[in-house]
Image (cartoon, helix red, strand yellow):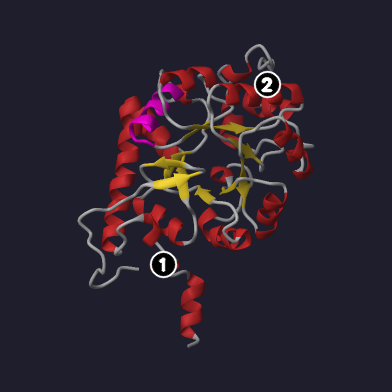
């Protein structure tokens, strides 16, 4: 909510944020999205360079069109690596080791995709995936199907649907990197993530592409935050399009947000400069929202700055 007679000086707004001990210029990171070369010939390299210029974190997708080594070599951005677990655990282990060897600072484990969601446009168009560079020489991606999406067939034939909470112990045993669990939407899963030793939680519904009628992430964020109780940081992705969206997420307890589609839009429009401009726009909008709400730094964004439908219902009873 907008405050009257601001208590702090608004001439300087500090958006800097700490994520797993790394200082970034704003509470906005780049979410893992696949196949950036479909948007621009430079692919994930352009995205990483924009992240570096804007001093924020990029989460590289396991399904990137540039290898994790190429992205690591292109700039000095802080990078996390997003992981889906394959049926062949040796391939998964090699990917994790490569990420660690190339300076990635965390593993982002996607936990909501034991199988590929039904993406009807892909099936109708019989989409054929580009080569997955990170598994080149490790996993055959030449899956031929006349029944729809090649991507759908590949995911369902290679991903391990038997991976459970208990298997995270195996993942922790093969890496020293902190593990963030992506896809948490409930109090129960948040507690389970704490139990298995997650270093952080990403509230995510996979962009709404896995299961129809999943709740919007902003609507369940506070439930997860309360379950975690400050033991590990909570982040949010899904539906972030404006600086006001970032502000609301932080007021409800997120330490930072991740953006996916807007980054791809910028990449498709103007490559590296397009991604940079998207990040700058979000930063500018958040800075303005903070100033108009009386917050000179991100720590001053509190629950009192937002009202939810539930809040108004309670107020109506007073």
Between disc 2 and disc 1, the foreground one is 2
In-image side of 11 versus 136 (left or right):
left
* Magenta stretch secondary structure, dominant: helix
Depicted 273 relative to depicted 285: above or below: above
Q: Which residue is mark 1?
A: 306
Residue 94 numbered tag:
2
- Distance CA(mark 2)–CA(mark 1): 45 Å
- Which badge, 2 or 1, comes first in the chain's sequence? 2
Q: Residue furthest bottom?
A: 318
What residue is shown at x 66% (from left), y 29% (from top)?
Answer: 152
The x and y percentages for residue 123 are 61, 30
User: Which quarter of the picture shows residue 155?
Assistant: top right
The residues colored magenta run 44-55
What residue is shown at x 26% (from left), y 62% (from top)?
Answer: 292
Q: Residue furthest left?
A: 11
What residue is shown at x 43% (from left), y 48% (from top)?
Answer: 240
Residue 43 numbered tag:
none
Depicted 195 relative to depicted 301: above or below: above
Q: Helix, strand, or loop for circle 2? A: helix
The x and y percentages for residue 198 are 65, 46
Toward the viewer: 223 or 209? 223
User: Which quarter of the picture shows residue 147?
Assistant: top right
- Badge 1: how crowded within 10 Å, few (<14), some, or many (20+)? some
The answer to whether residue 149 is visible is: no
User: Which quarter of the picture shows residue 100?
Assistant: top right
What residue is shown at x 78% (from left), y 43% (from top)?
Answer: 166
The x and y percentages for residue 220 are 57, 59
Q: Helix, strand, or loop for circle 1? A: loop
Depicted 287 relative to depicted 49: above or below: below
**Residue 53 is a magenta residue:** yes
The x and y percentages for residue 66 are 50, 19
């Amino acid at each position: 909510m907008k405050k009257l007679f601001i208590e702090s000086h608004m001439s300087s707004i500090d958006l800097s944020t700490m994520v797993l001990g790394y200082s970034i210029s704003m509470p906005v990171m780049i979410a893992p999205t696949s196949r950036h070369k479909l948007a621009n010939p430079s692919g994930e390299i352009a995205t990483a360079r924009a992240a570096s210029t804007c001093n924020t974190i990029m989460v590289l997708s396991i399904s990137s069109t540039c290898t994790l080594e190429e992205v690591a070599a292109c700039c000095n951005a802080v990078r996390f690596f997003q992981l889906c677990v394959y049926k062949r655990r040796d391939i998964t282990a090699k990917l994790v080791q490569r990420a660690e060897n190339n300076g990635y600072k965390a593993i982002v484990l996607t936990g909501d995709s034991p199988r590929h969601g039904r993406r009807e446009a892909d099936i109708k168009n019989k989409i054929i995936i580009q080569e997955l560079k990170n598994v080149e020489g490790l996993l055959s991606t030449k899956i031929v199907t006349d029944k729809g999406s090649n991507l759908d067939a590949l995911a369902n034939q290679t991903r391990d649907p038997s991976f459970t909470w208990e298997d995270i112990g195996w993942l922790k045993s093969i890496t020293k990197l902190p593990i963030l669990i992506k896809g948490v939407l409930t109090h129960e899963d948040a507690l389970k993530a704490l139990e298995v030793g997650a270093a952080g939680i990403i509230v995510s519904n996979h962009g709404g592409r896995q299961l129809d009628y999943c709740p919007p992430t902003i609507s369940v964020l506070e439930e997860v935050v309360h379950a975690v109780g400050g033991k590990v940081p909570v982040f949010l992705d899904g539906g972030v399009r404006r600086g006001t969206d970032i502000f609301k997420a932080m007021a409800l307890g997120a330490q930072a947000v991740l953006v996916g589609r807007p980054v791809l839009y910028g990449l498709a429009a103007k490559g590296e400069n397009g991604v940079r401009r998207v990040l700058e726009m979000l930063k500018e909008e958040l800075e303005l929202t903070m100033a108009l709400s009386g917050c000179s730094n991100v720590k001053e964004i509190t629950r009192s700055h937002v009202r939810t439908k539930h809040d108004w219902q309670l107020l109506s009873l007073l």
